[in-house]
Amino acid sequence: MGQNDTMEYIPSALAARLPAPEHIRRLFASVPRHRFLPDVMWSPDRTRYDRAADPEAWMRVAYSDQALTTQRDDGREGGMGIASSSSSAPSVMARMLTTADLSPAHRVLEVGTGTGYNAALLCQMLGSSQVTTIEIDRGIAATAQDALHTHGASPTVLAGDAETYAAGRPPAYDRIIATCSVSRVPQAWVRQTRLGGRIVTPWAPTPGAPGGVLAVLDVHAERAEGKFEGGLSFMWARGQRDPGGTPPPHQGALAESTDQQLHDPRGPWLDGERSLLLSLLMPHWKFGMGMEEGGTEPYVWVASTSAEPGWARLHADGRVEQGSGRRLADEAAAAWEQWNRWDQPDVSDFGLTVDLDRGWQTVWLHGPQHALWTMPRET
Ligand SMILES: C[S@@+](CC[C@H](N)C(=O)[O-])C[C@H]1O[C@@H](n2cnc3c(N)ncnc32)[C@H](O)[C@@H]1O
C-alpha cells in the first residue's frame, strides 16, 4: 500500500471505531490525523515513536485512539519528560465535539491549538472563517498553522494566553472548546461567549487532585453554569499548573495525631473513580505518594490547597497521621459519610456555577440550588 492509499484508508478506519454520532465520525474520516503529528512523539506509556526509524509503527500509533505527546517539558531539553502538548485521544475529541453541540452558524474558539488537528476538524464542520484557535506556545502555534494551511484549512490561529485573551471585548463566540484543563474558569472565557452559548472544558478543583471532569457550562448574563459530564483528564493550562498550598509532608514531619485503623486507609485515595468523587465532595486538597525510610509500601500524602494549612499521611499498615491545622483524613471520612447519606451520587450528578459578579465558582450537587462549596475564581 502506497502512502496515498494509507492516507485514504486509515482515517476512515479510525472514525469507524469511535463511539460518536455519524456526523462526528464523518469529520474524523475526512481529516488525516498523521498530517498534524510531528516525526517524534510519545504514547501514554512513554514509548517513543520516530517516523524515520519505524514509519509503520509511527503510522499505526497515529491512527490509534491514544493521546500522543508532541512536546515535553515546554520544549526544554533535560526535563522529566512531562507532556506539555499533545494530540488528544480521538475518542476524547469526539466526545467534546459532540458535547459542544455545534451547528453550522456557530463561531468557535478553541483553546490550545496543539497540533491543529482539532482545529482542522472544526474547520471541516463549520468552515474556516468560523474558527479561531489560540495557543500559548508560539512555536507550536506556528507549526499548527503550517499544518492547517497544508491541509487546506485557514482558521484564525492566535499565539497567546487564552486565560486573558480578548478580556474586555464584546462576546464573539457561540462555543469555547478548551483542550487544556482549568480549575478556575477564566473570566475572559465567560465574557467572550455569547448569551446562550456554551463552554466545554476539562475541569478539576486543583491540579493536584486526581483526574478531572468534563464541564459543560451554558452562558447566561454574568454567569456560566452546567453539569459535569463524567471524568476526563487533560494537561493543565500553563498558568494553572501549580496547586499551591501546604507542601507535601517531608520525611521527618511530626504528626499532631496518629490513629490506627484496622484496614489499609489508602484504598479510596488510590482508586481513580473514588478519589475523583472525593475531589468534588471535599474541596482544596492535593495528593501524592511517598515512601518512609526503609519502607516497602508507599504511603499516600494529602495536603491542603486552601489558606488553612494541613496534611495527612495514610500508611498501608493502617496508620493515619494528621498534621496541625486542617484534619484532612477526618474531612474525607465525613465526606464519605455524607456521600452515603446522599445515596452515593455519581460524578455526573455534580456541576459548577461560575459567577462573575461575585467572583467565585460553586460546585453543586443535583442542581445549582444545592451548593456544596465555593472557591474564588481569581482570573
Ligand atoms: C492537549 S494539547 C491541545 C491539543 C490540540 N487541540 C490538538 O488538536 O492537537 C493542550 C495545548 O494547550 C496549550 N495551552 C496550555 N495553556 C494554554 C493557555 N493558557 N492558552 C492557550 N493555550 C494553552 C498547550 O501549550 C498545549 O499545546
Image (cartoon, grey):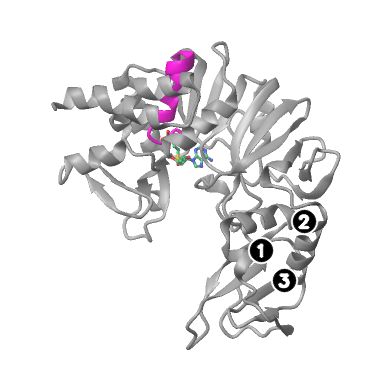
Q: Residue at x 52, y 41 (%)?
A: 180
Residue ID for mark 2: 339
Give yes or no for contact between labels 3 and 2 (Cβ–Cβ under 8 Å).
no
The Cα atoms of the two marked residues, 3 and 2, are separated by 15 Å
Give yes or no for contact between labels 3 and 1 (Cβ–Cβ under 8 Å).
no
The Cα atoms of the two marked residues, 2 and 1, are separated by 26 Å
Callout 1: 10 Å neighbours few (<14), some, many (20+)? some
Q: Residue at x 55, y 22 (%)?
A: 108
The part of the image, by quadrant, that contains residue 174 is top right
Residue 82 in view (yes/no)? yes
Give yes or no for contact between labels 2 and 1 (Cβ–Cβ under 8 Å).
no
Task: Locate residue 374, reporting x and y percent.
Answer: 79, 49
In this rendering, the label closer to the viewer, 3 or 1: 3
Q: Nearer the viewer, residue 41 or 319?
A: 319
Q: Secondary structure at mark 1?
A: loop
Q: Secondary structure at mark 2?
A: helix
Task: Locate residue 213, reporting x and y percent.
Answer: 61, 44
Residue ID for mark 3: 329
The Cα atoms of the two marked residues, 3 and 1, are separated by 17 Å
The part of the image, by quadrant, that contains residue 172 is top right
Q: Name the amino acid type tagged 1.
A: Gly
Q: Residue at x 41, y 19 (%)?
A: 26
Q: Residue at x 56, y 30 (%)?
A: 177
Q: Is residue 124 magenta?
A: yes
Magenta region, residue range: 112-127
Q: Earlier in the sequence, mark 2 or mark 1?
A: 1
Q: Earlier in the sequence, mark 3 or mark 2?
A: 3
In this rendering, the label closer to the viewer, 3 or 2: 2
